[in-house]
Image (cartoon, grey):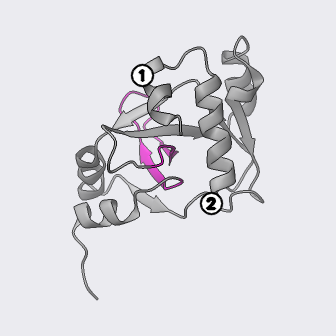
Amino acid sequence: MIKVPPEVAIRSTIRLGSVYYFPEDSFQSSEPHYFIVINTNPLGDEAIFLVCASSKINKVKKHRSTCPCETLIEITPDQYTGFRVATIIDCNKVFERSVEQLVDKLLKKKLKIKSEMDTSIVEQLRRGVISSPLVERRIKALLQD
């Protein structure tokens, strides 16, 4: 079996709709979360933009109750088979990462590459981010087609 270097593994998989599963250092929880790549050209852009999935739908809705409903996207396991339960994506928070940061997590065995998410769902996520009053204009501009 050929061993693929982590940088090659990340660079060869990173595209719109790539899904990575890893613990986020800024979270209180050390549990891994699903992160979805939402930029159309992540390797060509200044950063990789990701949104995070949560199975705690009611908690996220309560926390973001003042945000437009189109910024909270619910996804069922039928829509994305990588999820075992109904899940919500909070498009009001975008995580910026570099390829190197993802490679580092992969090297430390803290990142798993999951199956890609359907482009139609990812487009919904992008629209949600662009609709968010909390996301920086700079990020929104980079996500516009």
**Residue at 50% of width from left, 35% of height from top?**
143
**Residue at 55% of width from left, 15% of height from top?**
134
Viewed as shown, does residue 22 lie left or right of 64? left
The quarter of the picture where the N terminus appears is bottom left
Q: Amino acid at mark 1?
A: Arg
Magenta residue span: 17-40
Q: Amino acid at mark 2?
A: Gly
Viewed as shown, does residue 49 lie left or right of 63? left
- Residue 35, x across and y down, in percent: 50, 45
Nearer to me, 144 or 38: 144
Labelled disc at residue 138: 1
- Which label's residue is closer to the chain start, 1 or 2? 2
Nearer to me, 135 or 20: 135
Q: Is residue 71 above or below residue 74?
A: above
Q: Does 18 lie within the magenta span?
A: yes
Q: How many numbered dots are placed on residues in this image?
A: 2
**Residue at 68% of width from left, 41% of height from top?**
124
Nearer the camera: disc 1 or disc 2: 1
Query: Is residue 17 among the parts visible in the rendering?
Result: yes
- Residue 96, x across and y down, in percent: 37, 33
Give the residue at mark 2: 82
- Residue 82, x across and y down, in percent: 62, 60
Circle 1: is it few (<14), some (14-19), or many (20+) Cα within 10 Å? Answer: few
Nearer to me, 78 or 33: 78
